[in-house]
Image (cartoon, helix red, strand yellow):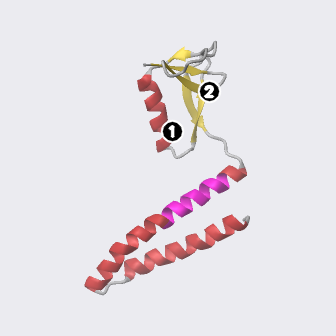
Amino acid sequence: MAVYFSKTTLGFYETPFYRGDLPTDAVEIGEEKRAELEMRRQEANGSLALAADASGWPTLVLATLSEAEKKQRRIFEVRQRLSEIDTSKIRAITEALLSSDTSRLAALEVEASALRLELSALEVGG
């Protein structure tokens, strides 16, 4: 399978899956290059955006986000961390039952409470 990238559309095109005409500026980049770019974008959690260099090859640049996008990203991050805390609490409860040490559980709850307040403010419009 061949993979192409278009500077004008900032899109990837795979043949033979793509049945239309390729954009006139499409350059063949290969599956490996596309996989590398996608992996780096995922690892950067949205802080990198796809762009094209002067010769039309795909590259990654720092993403510029609107305030609304920044807010949505933060909401996602807070929800993700709350989910991680919930998972960690299970282990902390077990540790507390076995050792009577509730410090880890208390620390998790303090962090979760602060995150819930932040999330509430973000969702209301803060």
Q: Crowdedness of circle 1 by 10 Å Cα count: few (<14), some, many (20+)?
A: some
Instruction: Give me the residue at 63% from left, 16% from top.
Output: 23
Give left or right: position of 11 versus 92. Answer: right
Q: Secondary structure at mark 1?
A: helix
Q: In the rendered image, which quarter is residue 101 located in?
A: bottom left
How far apart are the alpha carbons under marks 2 and 1?
A: 14 Å
Residue 70 vertical position relative to residue 92 in the rendered view, above or below:
above
- For the residue labelled by badge 2, is the local secondary structure a helix, a strand or a loop? loop
Quadrant of the drawing holding the N terminus: top left
Q: Is residue 81 magenta?
A: yes
Residue 111 appears at what percent x and percent y? 50, 73
Reading the image, the residue beneath label 1 is 41
Q: Position of residue 20 (x, y in %)?
A: 60, 17
Residue sitting farthest toward the bottom: 100
| Image coordinates for residue 18, horizontal then vertical, percent | 54, 21
Residue at left 61%, top 14%?
A: 21
Q: Which residues are magenta?
A: 70-82
Dominant secondary structure (helix, strand or loop) of the stretch shown in magenta:
helix
* Amino acid residing under circle 2: Leu
Q: Is residue 20 above or below residue 60?
A: above
Residue position for label 2: 10
